[in-house]
Image (cartoon, rainbow, N blue to C red):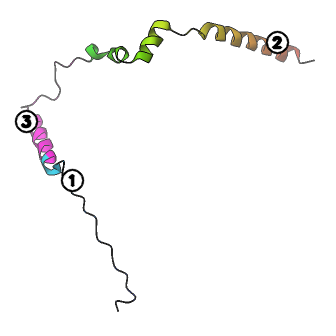
């Protein structure tokens, strides 16, 4: 009876028109086989991470300003906090009257 049966929805099959997944998968397999056979080095020996250290700071204005100016409110805040902790410690030792 067609009256009481529900129709199943059509399945979704996404086809990407911009990438070819099978070609990418095949290229990964070829690269892995070449690496296992020793034709391609595992890592590039000319790659040096030290030459990139600190380059991010050169391209962001906020970090450049922070590096040049430093923290201006740091010492006064630390002095106030230490003074407040000393007062709190005094009241805890002597008791609040």
**Is residue 46 covered in magenta?**
yes
Write the residue at 65% across / 11% down: 77
Write the residue at 38% across / 18% down: 60
User: As displayed, is residue 26 above or below residue 5?
Assistant: above
Q: Earlier in the sequence, mark 2 or mark 1?
A: 1
Where is residue 96 drawn, in percent x and y? 89, 18
Q: Residue 25: which numbered mark, if any?
A: none
Label 3 secondary element: helix
Cα distance between the residues tagged 1 and 3 = 33 Å
Which stretch appears magenta?
24-48
Where is residue 50 drawn, in percent x and y? 28, 14
Say which of marks 2 and 3 sits in front. 2
Q: Which residue is mark 1?
A: 16
Q: Are marks 2 and 1 in contact (CB under 8 Å)?
A: no
Q: Which residue is mark 2?
A: 90
Q: Are marks 2 and 3 in contact (CB under 8 Å)?
A: no
- Of 29 and 23, the residue lying toward us: 23
Residue 73 found in image quarter? top right
- Of 45 and 64, the residue lying toward us: 64
Q: Earlier in the sequence, mark 2 or mark 3?
A: 3
Where is residue 62 drawn, in percent x and y? 44, 17
Q: Which residue is mark 3?
A: 37
**Is residue 57 covered in magenta?**
no
Write the residue at 16% across / 29% down: 42
């Amino acid at each position: 009876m067609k009256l009481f049966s529900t129709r199943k929805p059509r399945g979704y099959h996404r086809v990407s028109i911009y990438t070819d997944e099978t070609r990418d998968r095949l290229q990964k397999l070829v690269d892995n086989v070449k690496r296992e056979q020793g034709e391609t080095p595992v890592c590039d020996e000319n790659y040096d991470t030290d030459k990139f250290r600190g380059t991010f700071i050169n391209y962001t204005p906020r970090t450049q300003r922070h590096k040049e100016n430093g923290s201006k409110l740091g010492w006064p805040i630390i002095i106030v906090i230490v003074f407040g902790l000393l007062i709190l410690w005094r009241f805890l030792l002597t008791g609040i009257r």
